[in-house]
Image: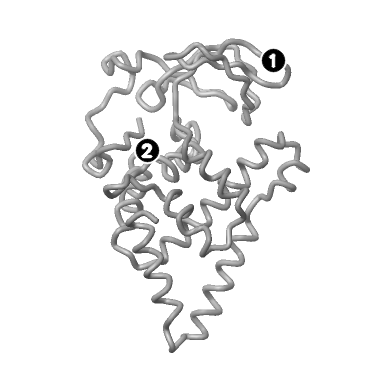
Amino acid sequence: MRKIATKVLKQINKHNARKVIDLNAYRQQKKATEELFNQITTTEIAIKTGHDPLHAVYIHTQNLLSILVEALQAISEPALSRFFNTAEAADDAYVPSSPPMSPLTKSYFNCWLLFDITAGLNKETLTTIIIDLANQLGTHKAMIEVMQTMQDSRMGIYEFMGRQGNKILLRELMGNEVIACICPASYRGTHQGETIFQAYVNYKPDVNYLQGLPDVSSSNPHNTNVPKFVSLLTNSPLS
């Protein structure tokens, strides 16, 4: 296990070893936890509501990770504070909620929070901590494999190349491979776009429109100074 995950496990074991338990607090915590898990959109539910089976697995895993991260916030471990301080500062600055308030969706922001923010010598993320704790949490092996696949993924900038059935075809700007992708927003692909926050110029219900060059900040319509929380994000830029 990596360092931060080991510290978290020690805190969990310390809590479980307590001889005196506040039964009222335990009941409240148990009820709150059960309510959170009842909110998870399972793979079966997602498929029944019309989602592609692969996307359904993605939805289920992301829901589960979000619930487990909420559980981590209740653990009194200073090593976890950087993650949540960073997330709070970024949330205040970017206000992720979809247009017209912000070009960033909650889903995009949560992926950054779960898989991209790193801390410690091992560059741990909230997801790697959960994976390391998986045996203690009783997580199914297949679910852990999906978590690891999502952790190994990354954000990229892609060019729209056309359509293939009910999927859109994308090519990463720095590569040649064309990938058939599921688009949950149902965007059928009629315009091409690039960077996210500073390039935001307009939107429709199923797509954000951007302007400017990714590596030329002055070409972006919303070019601003470095966000006030940049010191917290030394290796994890959001924009």
Which circle marks residue 164 in the picture? 1
The residue under label 2 is 94
The amino acid pointed to by label 2 is Tyr
- Badge 2 marks a residue whose secondary structure is helix
Q: Nearer the viewer, residue 236 or 141?
A: 141
User: Against 139, is 208 above or below?
Assistant: above
Say whether residue 225 is left or right of residue 43: left
Quadrant containing the C terminus is: top left
CB-based contact (under 8 Å), mark 2 and mark 1: no
Q: Residue at x 34, y 57 (%)?
A: 4
The amino acid pointed to by label 1 is Gln
Q: CA distance from mark 2 to mark 1?
A: 34 Å
* Position of residue 2 measured from the top left corner of the image (x, y, whole percent): 36, 54
What's the colour scheme?
one colour
* Position of residue 153 measured from the top left corner of the image (x, y, whole percent): 48, 34
Mark positioned earlier in the residue sequence (2 or 1): 2
Q: Pick out the residue farthest to the front.
A: 1
Q: Residues within 10 Å of mark 2 (few under 14, many from 20)?
A: some
- Badge 1 marks a residue whose secondary structure is strand
Say whether residue 22 is left or right of residue 92: right
Q: Residue at x 39, y 40 (%)?
A: 116
